[in-house]
């Protein structure tokens, strides 16, 4: 999946001279967490998050009264606190690449540019939503884990086993088991009504199935 298919296109932009008070009001009214700062040509200048505004509020609080604080913050513009060297991506960027960039740079949003034109915004919440949908956790399903070797045909073998019992695979994903190089957690989601039957048929075909957490994986490691 690509960023262009899930990005937010109804983005909220403001001018650099927007005050912090006005910016906070916009975030609250629109129920969003980020504002994109653009110039008169609609070119991206930077980004401000609700976290940035809260830091400004906290750093200015000291011994000021509420009215004094609001007056002070109404003199400061978003240009003073925005992140200027903003990392951007294109609509053709994959979701997993966007997630990696957010994780590496410890940020929660990425402006999306196409031919240098601002076309959208994708946030960590958007990425998480895609992940949850991809793994099928929001559907009525059962989760089975099989520890498998990194070998050609292992997914086909599991699919064949479930197909023989007419069990549909809702989703499937893997990740490496760091303590055992070459071994992967293969997580399968099937319809909830078929969970028990799926575990039985996989075990009958030689797979060791995990249906709950265990701290000792040794009994479930693939043989050989």
Image (cartoon, rainbow, N blue to C red):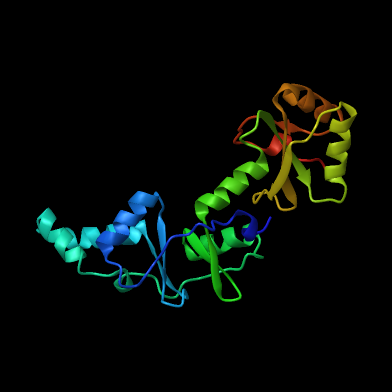
* Horizontal side of residue 125 vs 169, given as left or right: left
- Please tell me which residue is depicted at 61% across the width and 47% down the height of the picture: 131
Q: Is residue 92 left or right of residue 72?
A: right
Residue closest to the eye, 94 or 113:
113
Q: Nearer the viewer, residue 82 or 43?
A: 43
Report x, y in % for residue 204: 85, 27
Q: Is residue 62 visible?
A: no
Q: Seen in the image, is 197 located left or right of residue 214?
A: right
Which image quarter is the N terminus in?
bottom right
Is 104 above or below relative to 220?
A: below
Q: Can residue 171 be seen in this view?
A: yes
Residue 144 at x, y = what percent?
Answer: 71, 33
In the current view of this chain or complex, which residue is farthest to the front? 40
Please state if 13 lies on the left or on the right of 119 as rendered.
left
Towards the viewer: 10 or 132: 10
Residue 86 percent coordinates (x, y): 46, 72
Residue 118, above or below 63: below
């Amino acid at each position: 999946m690509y960023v262009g298919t899930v990005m937010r296109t109804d983005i909220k932009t403001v001018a650099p001279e927007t005050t912090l008070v006005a910016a906070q009001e916009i975030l609250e009214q629109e129920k969003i967490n980020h504002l994109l700062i653009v110039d008169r040509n609609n070119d991206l200048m930077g980004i401000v998050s609700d976290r940035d505004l809260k830091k400004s509020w906290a750093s200015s609080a000291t011994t000021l009264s509420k009215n004094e604080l609001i007056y002070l913050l109404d003199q400061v513009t978003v240009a003073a606190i925005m992140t200027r060297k903003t990392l951007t991506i294109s609509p053709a960027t994959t979701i997993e690449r966007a997630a990696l960039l957010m994780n590496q740079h410890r940020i929660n949003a990425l402006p999306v540019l196409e031919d240098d034109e601002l076309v959208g915004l994708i946030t960590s919440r958007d990425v998480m939503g895609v992940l949850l949908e991809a793994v099928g956790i929001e559907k009525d399903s059962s989760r089975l884990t099989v520890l498998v070797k990194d070998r050609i045909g292992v997914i086909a073998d599991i699919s064949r086993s479930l197909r023989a019992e007419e069990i549909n695979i809702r989703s499937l994903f893997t990740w490496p088991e760091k303590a055992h190089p070459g071994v992967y957690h293969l997580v399968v989601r099937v319809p909830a009504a078929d969970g028990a039957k799926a575990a039985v048929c996989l075990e009958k075909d030689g797979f060791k199935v995990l249906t709950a957490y265990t701290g000792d994986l040794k009994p479930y490691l693939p043989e050989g």
